[in-house]
Amino acid sequence: MHVGIILFLVILGSVLFHIFTPWYWTDIASNWGGMDDTITLTFWVGGGVFVAVCLFMIYCVFKFSYKENRRSEYKPEDKRLEKILTWATTLGVVALLAPGLMIWNQYVNVPKNAREVDVMAWQWGWQYRLPGEDGKLGTTKITNINDENPFGINPEDPFGKDDVMIQSDVLNLENNQPVKILLRSVDVLHNWYVPQFRAKMDAVPGIVTYYWFEPNKAGEYEVLCVEYCGVGHYAMRGTVIVQDNQEYENWLKEQETFSDLIANQENNIEINKKKLAKK
Amino acid sequence: MSDPKIEGLALKPGFKGMAEDTSSDQTMFKGVHWGKAMMWIFLLSDTFIFSCFLISYMKGRGSTPVEWPNPSEVFALDAFGVPVPLLLIAIMTFVLITSSGTMALAVKYGYEKNRKMCGWLVLATAIGGLTFVGMQAFEWSKLIHEGVRPWENPFGAAQFGSFFFMITGFHGTHVSIGVIFLFIYAYKVFAGHYDSGKRGWFTSMKGDYVEIEILGLYWHFVDLVWVFIFAFFYLW
Amino acid sequence: MSEDYNDNKTIQAQSSEAISGGGSVSPDLDYVRPAEIPDQDLYHGHSFLTKWVFCQDAKVIGVQYFLLATFTGIIGLILSWLMRLQLGFPGAAGFMTAEHYYQFVTMHGMIMVVYFLTALFLGGFGNFLIPLMVGARDMVFPYLNMVSFWSFFVAVAVLLASFFVPGGPTGAGWTLYPPQTILEGTPGSGWGILLMCISLILFVAGFTMGGLNYLITVLQARTRGMTLMRMPLTVWGIFTATVLAMLAFPALLVGALMMTLDKVLQTSFFMPTILKAGEVLEYGGGSPILFQHLFWFFGHPEVYIVALPAFGIVSDLISVHARKNIFGYRMMVWAIVGIGALSFFVWAHHMYVSGMNPWFGFFFATTTLIIAVPTAMKVYNWILTLWRGNIRMNVVMLWCLGFIITFVNGGITGIFLGNVSVDVPLSDTYFVIAHFHMVMGIAPLMVIMGAVYHWFPLVSGRFLDEKLGKWHFWLTFLGAYSIYFPMHYLGFIGVPRRYFEMYDSPYMTSAVGMNEFISTAAFIVGAAQFILIYNIIKTLKTGKPAGHNPWKANSLEWLTPKVPPEHGNWGERLPVVHRWPYDFSVPGAKEDFIPQTTPPSEVAHTEAEKT
């Protein structure tokens, strides 16, 4: 008796926990509401099956507990019932899979107007690069990276000259503007993830991976590295600030481009040379 | 125990026969020695190992940014001053395949209880395998002499050396183990252990000529794998 | 030496010997085909060393596997306590640095999945039960079987040795993803990872020897009358899991070998050009994702290597203790085989956000959700077995009920993670941790515990204490459920896995209370396991004697002439099987069970199905 009651309380507790939980999604701040909807759908279908199966089991526990003089039913199989259950399950699975695949289709197809952002990861930090006025990012190479060229931009590539370089872990994004995140890593696996945006992808050294989203809520969000990358993994955080168009443009203007950086360095060299000459 | 003979059991051919054996009691492979069935399954598992190696090799070769070396130049051998591509490999392959032939004959004579012929043929197979390993050692040292290392090589992509040494090394280990067993078995044949059913030193199983066939399965497999390695490394 | 061996007995009696005078019953009813294989030649140990240490008896080897796996499992348990201490009460353990934390995470994962669960199910239960259940005298290659255990022993020794080498054990996460695994910045990237790879290679080698034994014993050494479709589902589960292991471990072996070479010889199989601390390393041109494919080609079947034996065993336990045949036996067998086959086509669902070609997502999401169908069928059949049964509410049944709840829960969350776009927000969060602990940690553990209570009378001849068992069950079940059920919601918040500490982010601070709760529950659940150890020690000497077939089961392992069974299992004569092992409560039969060896003529007037 008490077994059934405790098990019933476990199931009831699970349902109540789900209804009243204070721990749930952060408010979504991107276009991926479809993911949340699919989760909700899966919750209804899956949760329903879970509760139904467990309650059936608990009913059996109550109803068919051992009695000395009773015999079980002898029924090795029931083809009809098995068939019905198979098809019902298949149907349920298809119902869950279909929206999942549809959203994945959107996820892998980046809209044409998406603005590219080069996210460069290392142990343990981030920096970002945006295309300049030509709207194109210059090509890069890990072996080019040095103090004068922190992103390893190919110096011969004309597209790279006007790239905007943000040597900090704070990235600003324009509200309601799709972005294509291009991920690369110079050492090990990383993953650039903002829980409020829902989307994520690993940064893999040697290749460039991508994903896209459209922020739709201004604010400041924390970036987490969610692919284990060594002892500093848990401290590898960053920040994203989603701003409205005007603020964003103002911010963008203040950022340094690759040619600015080269010019500054050349200036510095000139100044140093002059200093030396004076001595 | 040798292959058990089952009184009054006629094997039916085709799918129907297979289904019947599968649904029968006691054994699935009728009249097949346990050790032989074991070797087949082990070889299936081993096939997966070599497949993983070769698929990794294809993936590695396909995605390296530096160009892959040209095998017919790297593996060429000077014969009378003329570089002949794949000369050594051709001889190695020939030797190994010949040893498969002698192995098959050894199995035949084993079942005929022809102790002498069986013993000599097992010995011949062992010597063939040893020759193969020797030539492979020669090839390795030649390549090492030319500067090929697991981590680099002067001809192109570093992965060439890595995969070459790893996969041929793994295969060479298989051949070497086979050679050791062939010598042991040759001794056992000559000493008559398979005629008297003398128990083995380690496993304490009774000796039987079926063991020659089991070793033969392994040997043919090692041969077959070599053909694939040959095709993927030397001809691609 | 010859007295050490059985003489090769002559092939057993030509036709069924047990023909009772059943009046009108035709003697042909009891006909079983004559023996196809001669009786097995066994080596009987005669010294302590050959009887208990380097023993060739599968039952002893099974117990050896069981004990060693349990020992490593307890180490894994202690590591999990240390992790939970850090997560629930950061800084409470003064020595806990991030390096230690990651080393504990890694070793806990690897130990529990490979050295505990796999070894316990296949090495432990497989060795003990397969020969008994199919009616063989022993495994077909007893010597190889013995070597298999000792390889496992060396593998465990090498694994544990890594705690004592400079730099400590590897802290790369149990998935060992390169490049970080072998680069500085990951703890134990020197000796630790090397020993891990060596230990894995040894484990695979040892397992292969054992696996060949299990397969050939099932395929070629069954007793007369034992068809494949008369085998208990336990054997089906272990058999299929072994097939998976034989085909999946090669990928792990190759991955570990290539990783070792990357570490030791500076090859670049998995290593692209890497810039570290301002310097370009001597690697270049390799593919990190290749390792992930190799790892998960092993890793996903590995999940089923653990799950399928659990499925099989729980089916038998439920059937015996509900006094009812397993519902839809054939469906169950095909589901096991189908799940096993499909498990080779779903591996990349662990890699949806790994940076592989995103188009793979469509294929692997579909195959993954297809696998949900046979799995669901198994769940339906378990609960339909309870339906109109006569359920004994003993400890064994409690563990089975606990298994069904945790397994269904974990299976449903699997549908979240398998469905590619739902996986995107949830992967690498605590949702994943909760999911896989529920479905392949707690659920199989429930089965192991149930199996221990069920078969302990066979191994030792005595019952375990029921009262202690009930404490053990309720503490474990309720505790484990309250660890992992709320943990899913941490994942929804977005708390990432493998974080040493995380309490400075606004939405994570809300989880502090929950983490404290989870940790406390984890300490209790861990401690509760020692009740079982106490129970075993206590009842080994003083427990209630079990006698023959105490559960009134049908399968062969309970029908040995002696309890516990001796070496050779069956005494003079091998059993002859006439029916499936699930003839419970057959209408018309005197008792509510008909053992597999009962010839049809003895129960002629029952309605037992022809199986």
Image (cartoon, rainbow, N blue to C red):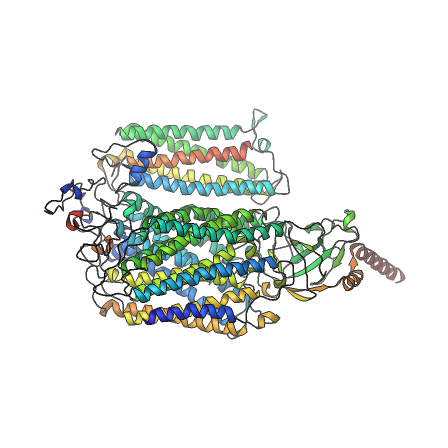
Q: Position of residue C2 (x, y in %)?
A: 18, 46
Q: Relative to C9, is B48 on the left or the right? A: right
Q: Nearer the viewer, residue B98 or B1?
A: B1
Q: Nearer the viewer, residue B84 or A167?
A: A167
Asked whether residue C70 appears in the rendered view, the answer is no
Q: Position of residue C329 (x, y in %)?
A: 32, 50
Asked whether residue A234 appears in the rendered view, the answer is yes
Q: Quadrant of residue B47?
A: top left
Q: Position of residue C406 (x, y in %)?
A: 41, 63
Residue at x 52%, y 64% (from the top left corner): C430
Q: Relative to C355, is A170 on the left or the right? A: right
Q: Nearer the viewer, residue A275 or C383?
A: C383
Q: Position of residue C162 (x, y in %)?
A: 46, 60
Q: Nearer the viewer, residue C444 or C375?
A: C375
Q: Quadrant of residue C227?
A: top left
Q: Quadrant of residue C278?
A: bottom right
